Amino acid sequence: MGAFRWFSLIVSIWLMCGSAHAERRMALVMGNSAYKSVPKLSNPANDAALVGGMFKKAGFDWIDIKTDLNASEMRKALRDFGQRARDAEVAVIYYAGHGIELDGTNYLIPTDAALETDSDVLDETVALDRALFAVEPAKQLRLIILDACRDNPFAKTMKRTVAARAIGRGLAKVEPASPNTMIAFAAKAGSTASDGDSKNSPFAAALVERLPTPGLDLRKALGFVRDDVLKNTSYKQEPYVYGSLGGDDMPLVAAKPTATGPQASPEDAVRRNYELALQLGTRDGWTAFLSRYADGFYADLAKGQLNKIAAEEARAAAVEKARQAEDEKARLASDRAKKTEQDKAAAAAKAAEDARLAAEKAKQVEEAKAAAAEQRRKEIEAAVAKALADKQAAEKNPADQKIVALPSPALSPEPAQSPQQLTRAVQAELRRVGCLANAEEGDWGAKSQRSLTQFNKYAGTKLNTTLASTDALDAIKAKSGRVCPLVCDHGFRADGDACVKIACRAGYRVNDDNECEKAQDKKPLVTREEPRKREERRQVETAPSNKPQASGQLFCNSAGCRPVGKGCRVEAAPVSDQTSPMAGRTREVCN
């Protein structure tokens, strides 16, 4: 009996260890369509069935598919899944339906929610943190997929109890605190997703196409999902992923065993890790890559990517410093500070603006260098792939060395876009980088040509502006942020990517330099007389007077002096008449 007990104990330990090491993959799939207080959604229930079927085909050990859940049912489903996830290596939650963001926190909306006021969100919805709590026990991978970024009708009818409370458009950005946790949004934070024209959303259709690929790393699979959704929505919807994983590949479906043959080149692993770091695009990702691969072709490319990130960080710091200097200058002007202080602040603001322009130019240079390096990498990899394909073809057909290898599937061209689709795609990218204000409905007109000319100017490119081309689309896509500067009308100033009106305090106005200055009292202006009034005044002045006018002379005699009468004059008496008593004297003569 003792031997039997020891044997049973050993078998039990072996079974326990075996089950502990077995990879248990579990998924909870929820789709809410039949909302009671807002119009019904057509796709979420269909999307839940489609995604749940994908998990079944992928060989997941446990899948629970639930549709049209009220608040209590959603909470119970998450609670039960969290208990099961304690034994899981991989835990996945997929949710399709309405979601809402309130003060930076995301909530999933059950079908029985009414949400008449913003305070009802806390009582009638389920916080996204509850789903994160449910997947947290999983040991290897925690994944949450949210197809909940639709245009939310609740937000339009909801009453605000606090006027300053923020209710966002779409869902807010999330940074998971737990390691090996990823959250995939159907659309970037602050934007909305489309239901599409078919029975499934573009996001769900791309998920079932890409995620079950055997051996495909999850990060790369979600990158392909992003590309598919962008193309299928004419670049209007961009899925986004938050969180991070380790350096090892993390496929949702394990790779199929391959036949024994030549081992893969070590360079393939370097290239794969480089592409993962490129997709992540952060300083930490590139630093981790360089810590493992310090030398070589890909290390040089990684250093160029780090230089680009450093240039962007320097540009952001210069923009912030310029903004602070401008604010200080405006404050001193509004406070009527001493002229020396204002001059000093103005000089500091100008120096900060010069530094911002220099940092912007340095950033553009580093981006151009990185884009050129990436183009060279793609060309080199394509040449290597072609040479390898030619070699394999020659080895398979030694009798015929002239066989031309077919292009690698990874390098096969994408389906060609129609001219109108290409035009819309280029216009969308021009709007993204701040070079085009409004769309032209698929027509490549003068406005689009001017916008591409502006892009050439500030990006340092020489693209043909007369038409929309794939070269232009690729070049604009390579820019991660704004390229063309924001130009505001008089009375407005740039604030990030928007123009805001300049507000001056009482008694001040905006001058021609877009600065607040004290308003001056207007002085009366001296104007020229109108020709008609000037002529009337001349006639009055030159008109003869009816009053008797004196000659202005005085006549004096022994009786005294008096003015000479009208029509009379004073003249001297002739000297020749010596007999006259007036001889040699003046006399008054009247006609």
Image (spheres, rainbow, N blue to C red):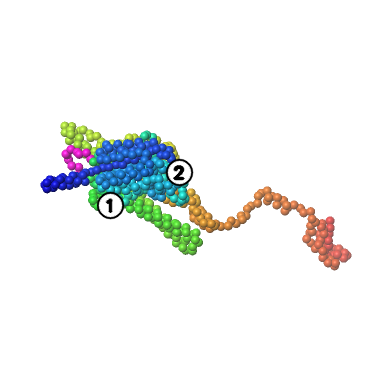
Numbered badge on residue 107: none
What percent of the width, then of the height, locates residue 22?
21, 44
Q: Residues within 10 Å of mark 2 (few under 14, many from 20)?
A: few
**Location of mark 2 (residue):** 156
Residue 449, given in percent of the width and then of the height, sits at: 42, 41
Query: Foreground residue, 500 or 577?
Result: 500
Please report contact status of discs 2 and 1: CB closer than 8 Å, yes or no. no
- Residue positioned 45% across, 57% down in the render: 327
* Location of residue 436 in the rendering, given as x and y in whole percent from the top left corner: 42, 43
The residue drawn where x is 15% and y is 47% is: 9
In the depicted structure, whether residue 457 falls above or below residue 333? above
Q: Nearer the viewer, residue 362 or 108?
A: 108
- Labels 2 and 1: the sequence-earlier one: 2
Task: Please tell me which residue is depicted at 49% across the width and 59% down the height of the picture.
Answer: 333
Per the image, the residue denoted by label 1 is 287
Please report the bounds of the magenta region as a residue range: 255-267
User: Quick one: 410 or 246, which is closer to the camera?
Assistant: 246
Question: Label 2, label 1: how many angstroms apart (C-alpha)?
Answer: 45 Å
Q: Label 2 amino acid?
A: Lys
Q: SS class of the residue under badge 2?
A: helix
Q: Is residue 260 magenta?
A: yes
Magenta stretch secondary structure, dominant: loop
Residue shown at 17% from the left, 40% from the top: 262
Is residue 558 visible in this depiction of the protein?
yes
- Single out the residue that lies furthest toward the right: 579
Picture layout, residue 161 above or below residue 67: below
